Amino acid sequence: MNDRSLAGDLEAFHCQQLLLYRMYRLVLSIPEAPTAEGSVVIHEITRLLENATLAAEDRWVEPGLLDAAPTQGKAYLSWLKGLAREHRVFKHPYYMDFIRNHATREDVRAYVIQESVVDGRFDDLLAMMQVGSNGDAKMEIAANFWDEMGNGNSDQVHTYLFNKIFEVFDITDEELERGLTANALLSGNLAVLLCRYRHLYPEAVGFLGMTEWLVPDRFVQVVHAWNRLGLPDIGIVYHRLHITVDSQHAAGWFHNVVVPAASSETMRRGIARGTLLRLNSSARYLDERLPEAHAS
Amino acid sequence: MNDRSLAGDLEAFHCQQLLLYRMYRLVLSIPEAPTAEGSVVIHEITRLLENATLAAEDRWVEPGLLDAAPTQGKAYLSWLKGLAREHRVFKHPYYMDFIRNHATREDVRAYVIQESVVDGRFDDLLAMMQVGSNGDAKMEIAANFWDEMGNGNSDQVHTYLFNKIFEVFDITDEELERGLTANALLSGNLAVLLCRYRHLYPEAVGFLGMTEWLVPDRFVQVVHAWNRLGLPDIGIVYHRLHITVDSQHAAGWFHNVVVPAASSETMRRGIARGTLLRLNSSARYLDERLPEAHAS
């Protein structure tokens, strides 16, 4: 399956990512009944899927690009941001034109389903990635986590707010898993994969930092669509909030985690790799969401 | 080794727990160089060690005790506290007499080394255990985590304060690993083991809740010893803080996590099991810390 997926078989790619998604549910959900969590066979299969997923993503990274990273903190950060600004995912027409100007209620509903794989569990991703971190970096991740938890205010917890949108659209759990495309599953799986291993901590820094940096510009378009369609206000609190909050998070992340880390070769390469994994996978995901039929 | 440890071979027990401790370092520390994290063989060995560790601990739980748990929330909590109050670990002479009245500077130094396995990474334990939790329970764990992070104040981060004690006593990392007894390693390993698996979430609730509930009474004795010996004030901030903070944490934990969970059979049994794992392992650890020679 991994070989067929690498060779371009889209059905194998979907199976691969759906299987990994289910494996991750074992380590991300508290079960009511006994599960196969911890099983050696499950671990072995998970590792095969993870390695295949990373190897496939690395093929999208231009050879030699990671070696070109500047070694000085601020120059490194500018270089990273430049990679994003010159990438076709930046100001992608899916958000800038389709969501903003054309998306119907059904399109927005479909969009929310696909986004759930990352937004619906951002707190857990941060909690996992902070394990073993220290000093300013740990505090930055922890503060970000505490923001996700509504700074202690239950009705401001971000995953709670995000799930409010599901009520607006009456989306069930089954529909969720059935509706996820291979590239949406991949986005969520990559986030979990990079956050759950300590040796991929640099990649997680790049991946989540770039995710947050791209959010404000994207969510402005979602809020615009929401207003244009006259959808219930309760559903858009999450997006409105993240326009402000995520630009602060990205700034703090860049300043307190990325810039100081640039002095280390391992961190520099890993952060850049994680950034590119996010840019490339997000671009393919958005391309797929923008069929000719929708662009009408 | 696991069999020999179960049969009472103390050297095998020490090897077993030291090996598990090193396995856990792979998943708890951010490495500078490539590691074996994620390796299938490492995972298989870890699972053998974990299963042997849990099986050995379960032998200390009185048969039928878990079935006796009341099903009503408040009655259940009283029953849990009763288990602790009647346990010999409660008001254990190691704290109540030895640490308070007799411990020398060297004894306090040795005590701090042994305690590092839990206190030195309590934030990471909370972060791991909160994955997949929801609602009030998630908020309680998150608030506890944010307290550990000094509520955003870098010089109030608890692990930072704890490590200040290491400076007072000039304790190095090598000495740390060399100096840890099998039962101290076990205490730390049990905490990681219960927090890292989602199917052991109920056990983690019991284990960490009971750990926090026992802290204030214990740390009062440590502070007493510290003052008696005239040790530098910088080293005791952590303990003084936890006398207040942990009684609040334990109360919140019991009220917001334990009481509501008692309606579920799985949660009830798991929380009680985790509580007993903590009481029993802590008792054996404290017994060992109290040799005749020290009690003078």
Image: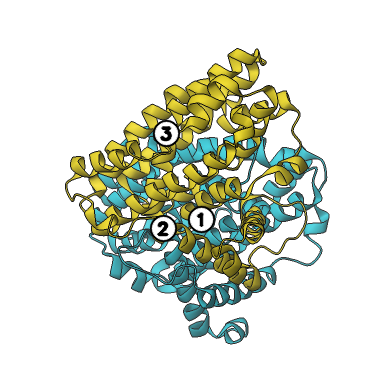
Chain colours: A yellow, B cyan
User: Vertically, is A94 above or below B98?
Assistant: above
Q: Position of residue A72 (x, y in %)?
A: 16, 47
Earlier sequence position, callout 1 versus callout 2: 1
Taking the spot 77% from the left edge, 43% from the top edge, the residue there is: A174
Q: Which mark is residue A193?
A: 1
- Marks 2 and 1: in contact by CB < 8 Å? yes
Say which amino acid is labelled 2: Leu
Amino acid tagged 1? Leu
- State how far apart marks 1 and 2 are (Cα): 8 Å
Mark 2, residue position: A200
In which quadrant of the rendered view does residue A295 lie? top right
| Residue A241 visible in rendering | no
Q: Secondary structure at mark 1?
A: helix
Nearest to viewer (mark 1 / mark 3) = 3
**Secondary structure state at the residue bearing disc 3:** helix
Q: Earlier in the sequence, mark 2 or mark 3?
A: 2
User: Where is the C terminus of chain B found, in terms of image quarters?
Assistant: bottom left
Disc 3: host chain: A
Residue at (37%, 51%) from the top-left corner?
A133
Q: Residue at x 62, y 46 (%)?
A: B132
Question: B225 or B52, which lies in front?
Answer: B52
| Nearer the observer, B175 or A190 | A190
Mark number for residue B74?
none
Disc 2 vs disc 3: which is toward the camera?
A: 3
- Residue A161 pos. (x, y %): 61, 27
Chain holding disc 2: A
- Circle 1 packing at 10 Å, graded few (<14), some (14-19), many (20+), is many
Q: Which residue is mark 3?
A: A214
